[in-house]
Image: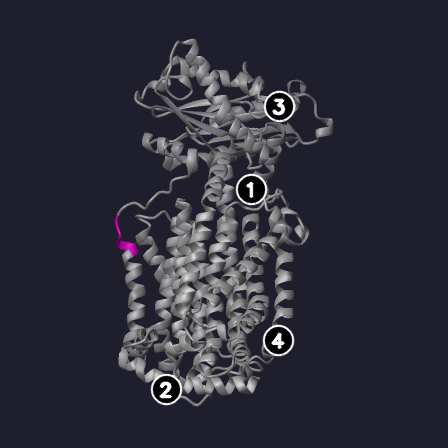
């Protein structure tokens, strides 16, 4: 029956799987040309990135922060970075009021003099010893604050900052009993940037060797283990080249590059594992190299293309956020998956054809003999056999476990981490910012109010605007701690930038309430009252022709999280609907598509629960070396959803294809499930171990954001590859029975007969299923 159906298909025209088979077949026959063409593509990508002229695209922040940024961009000049130095006694118990402590005053005088002696590096030095310096003394009277701006031009800012920092260190050495703690715009940005770079270097340093070791154990052969690494490495290199070209139109940052590397290695290794494992199985079944690769292209090759397209389209859901930060990330991730997918059906078959049986040479002692065979997993076969006998009991128990794991996610609170929450206080700048926050709330990174003229560019020079800004001092004192001093204003081009310390420079509830107070009450009232006194009307706050926007670290985190929260339902709806359609097209079964989506949601929900329990609730904080701050990074759940939903489809489609293959070969539903799980479990387990290891490396990094990402992704992959694919999936397929691959208005096997299958592969699959049963 299968042969007749297949003959009718061939007479009617090429099937869907034939395209992948033809491409791979061409690569096998013209292996030298395919390999050379692949490396030529990599060279072209690198050359294109080197010769592409022009500036790269800049990102725009969301909300009010973005409006302020666009205004400052139009000025073609930016506010000078402001730095702050906290002056206080090292022994708080013995500390006296600042005005009565001669040591503190001498250190302050010395610091101010040293800063002013730096030639052209520092400007606008303010001291608590000045006539109006009372605002630079803390409320408890025990600490002082020296502020200064790092002079330009932009290309010399780094040099000037280093000179000022060196001056602070020199003064600190002369006054060991006084603490001089520096934190501000430049120092906080630098410590975050350096932390990110160091963290990703450390991740790359550990993850790549770890991947190599695992591949050697999985394959037991140096040559076989090198193939996934070669595909992953060339894929990432080519993607970086193309990404540098696209960066002229799409904003790309360092996080994008790191994610491209991570995802590129993951899918490159996954696709290679799918191919290599299937080719080994077919060779073990007695096929020659070319026949084995033909069958592999027809089966695993098709799985790679379907799963690759699914991952790419799911990742596209991030574009619904409208955030520039995600545009570059989405572009890079889609590009690296696409390149890996193309390589897996072109250069990968060509390499395997060129190596032939030599792919298993250079075996590793002890593990090589066992790993180079293509045996089924007896352990997973036993699990699957037990599950299909009592699918309701096993499936219900597994689903209950995942639901319990997901329960903490109901209390998840989205909140980005401030610098003092993200990094350890062992970092001097972070410790300085934390101490400064205690003495001068909001001073380390105040809100930046950008005021500009809507029609008249010189409107900010209006005396009424200046009086409105001056009135902010009194309003800060009357804001019940929401706003704080010292407040300063700087003319930037034809705009005015006013620095207003909030109750906190972080992203907690106090900081967000203070930001809302500033945006919705303080600024409109200040501008409105001054305008009323002058008899003016119109414009924001009442002053004619004036507009304003509030930016800063707190404002950016607030606006970013708000945008994520608002757009998340659209992203979820897009990914779920798209995944359903793609799975229906791939398997001709709405039931399988719906079950697949539910299983993915269960595994992601369990990962959300683990993330909340560990980081928001603070469990395992000592073991993982972090300080809980009562929230989860705002962008992480959405990022995890899209990434995990895409990557888990690799495993899901691969295992489902193995089950369906046996179903097409005539095995009953339970035999097909046991055989498919047993044959696919080895690949899924190996791939999951590699990805879990790669993600787990992030747990040892310093920033809490990457610890969260590492734990969340590693837990999700681990759950997905074991409990979901090993228990829930076979239970669901067993419960569906003959309806599993039955499309609408079709007989039980009609959809199966519509799908292409290799006759010999089908016969072998049926025999293996019977053996395993």
Which of disc 2 and disc 1 is earlier in sequence?
2
Instruction: From the image, tell me which residue sits under label 2.
Output: 3
Q: Which mark is first along the chain, 2 or 3?
A: 2
| Residue 333 percent coordinates (x, y) | 40, 57
Q: Residues within 10 Å of mark 3 (few under 14, many from 20)?
A: many
- The answer for how far apart the CA atoms under marks 4 and 2 are is 33 Å
Rendering coords of residue 11 (x, y %)? 27, 82
**Magenta part of the chain:** 49-53
* Lateral position of residue 577 relative to residue 102, left or right: left
Task: Give the camera-side residue of 534 and 201.
Answer: 534
Which residue carries the number 1 mark? Answer: 415
Give the camera-side residue of 582 and 70: 582
Question: Can you tell which of label 1 and label 4 is closer to the viewer?
Answer: 4
Asked whether the beta carbons under mark 1 and mark 2 sit within 8 Å of each other, the answer is no
Question: What is the C-alpha distance between the residues marked 3 and 2?
Answer: 86 Å
Q: Say which element carries label 1.
A: loop
Q: Nearer the viewer, residue 518 or 272?
A: 518
| 536 with respect to 391 (left or right) | left
Label 4 close to label 2 by CB (< 8 Å): no
Residue mark closest to the camera, 3 vs 4 = 4
């Amino acid at each position: 029956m299968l042969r007749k159906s297949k003959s009718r298909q061939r007479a009617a025209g090429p099937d869907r799987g034939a395209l992948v088979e033809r491409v791979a077949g061409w690569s096998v026959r013209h292996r030298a040309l395919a390999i050379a063409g692949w490396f030529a593509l990599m060279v072209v990508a690198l050359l294109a990135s080197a010769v592409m002229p022009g500036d790269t695209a800049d990102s725009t922040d969301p909300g009010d922060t973005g409006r302020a940024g666009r205004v400052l961009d139009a000025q073609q000049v930016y506010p000078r970075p402001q730095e702050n130095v906290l002056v206080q006694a090292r022994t708080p118990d013995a500390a006296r009021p600042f005005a009565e402590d001669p040591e503190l005053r001498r250190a302050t005088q010395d610091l101010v003099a040293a800063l002013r002696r730096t030639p052209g590096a520092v400007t606008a030095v303010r001291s608590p010893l000045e006539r109006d310096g009372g605002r630079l003394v803390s409320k408890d009277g025990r600490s002082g604050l020296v502020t200064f701006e790092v002079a330009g031009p932009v290309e010399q800012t780094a040099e000037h900052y280093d000179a000022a920092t060196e001056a602070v260190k020199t003064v600190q050495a002369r006054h060991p009993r006084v603490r001089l703690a520096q934190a501000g715009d430049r120092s906080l940005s630098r410590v975050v940037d350096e932390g990110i770079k160091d963290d990703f270097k450390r991740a790359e340093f550990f993850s790549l060797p770890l991947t190599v070791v695992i591949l050697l154990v999985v394959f037991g052969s140096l040559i076989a283990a090198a193939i996934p690494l070669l595909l992953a490495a060339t894929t990432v290199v080519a993607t970086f080249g193309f990404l540098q070209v696209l960066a002229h139109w799409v904003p790309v940052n360092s996080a994008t590059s790191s994610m491209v590397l991570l995802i590129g290695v993951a899918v490159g290794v996954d696709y290679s594992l799918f191919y290599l494992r299937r080719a080994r199985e077919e060779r073990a079944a007695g096929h020659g190299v070319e026949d084995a690769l033909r069958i592999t292209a027809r089966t695993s090759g098709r799985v790679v293309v379907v799963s690759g397209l699914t991952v790419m389209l799911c990742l596209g859901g991030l574009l619904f956020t409208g955030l520039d930060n995600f545009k570059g990330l989405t572009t890079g991730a889609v590009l690296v998956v696409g390149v890996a997918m193309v390589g897996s059906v072109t250069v990968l078959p060509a390499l395997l054809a060129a190596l032939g049986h030599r792919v298993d040479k250079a075996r590793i002692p002890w593990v090589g003999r066992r790993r180079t065979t293509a045996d089924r997993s007896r352990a997973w076969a036993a699990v699957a056999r037990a599950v299909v006998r009592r699918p309701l009991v096993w499936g219900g128990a597994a689903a209950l476990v995942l639901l319990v794991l997901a329960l903490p996610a109901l209390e998840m609170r989205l909140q980005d981490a401030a610098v003092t929450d993200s990094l350890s206080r062992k970092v001097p700048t972070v410790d300085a910012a934390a101490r400064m926050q205690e003495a001068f709330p909001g001073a380390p990174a105040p809100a930046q109010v950008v005021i500009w003229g809507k029609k008249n560019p010189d409107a900010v020079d209006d005396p009424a605007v200046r009086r409105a800004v001056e009135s902010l001092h009194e309003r800060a004192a009357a804001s019940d701690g929401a706003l704080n001093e010292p407040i300063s204003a700087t003319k930037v081009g034809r705009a005015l930038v006013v620095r207003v310390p909030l109750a906190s420079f972080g992203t907690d509830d106090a900081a967000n309430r203070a930001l809302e107070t500033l945006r919705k009450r303080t600024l409109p009232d200040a501008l409105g009252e001054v305008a009323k006194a002058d008899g003016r009307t119109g414009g924001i706050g009442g002053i004619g022709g004036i507009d304003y926007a509030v930016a800063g670290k707190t404002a950016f985190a607030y606006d970013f999280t708000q945008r994520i929260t608002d757009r998340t339902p659209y992203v979820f709806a897009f990914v779920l609907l798209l995944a359903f359609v793609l799975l229906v097209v791939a398997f001709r079964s709405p039931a399988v598509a719906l079950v697949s989506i539910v299983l993915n949601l269960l595994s992601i929900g369990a990962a959300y629960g683990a993330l909340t329990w560990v980081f928001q609730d603070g469990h395992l904080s000592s073991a993982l070396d972090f300080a809980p701050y009562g929230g989860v990074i705002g962008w992480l759940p959405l990022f995890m959803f899209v990434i995990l939903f895409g990557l888990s489809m690799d495993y899901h489609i691969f295992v489902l294809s193995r089950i369906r293959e046996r179903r097409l070969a005539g095995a009953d539903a339970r035999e097909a499930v046991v055989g498919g799980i047993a044959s696919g479990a080895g690949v899924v387990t190996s791939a999951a171990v590699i990805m879990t290891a790669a993600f787990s490396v992030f747990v040892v990094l310093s920033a809490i954001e990457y610890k969260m990402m590492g734990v969340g992704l590693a837990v999700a992959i681990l759950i997905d590859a074991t409990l979901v694919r090993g228990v829930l999936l076979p239970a669901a397929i067993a419960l569906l029975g003959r309806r599993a691959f039955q499309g609408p208005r079709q007989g039980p096997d009609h959809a199966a007969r519509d799908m292409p299958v290799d006759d010999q592969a089908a016969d072998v699959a049926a025999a293996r299923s019977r053996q395993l049963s």
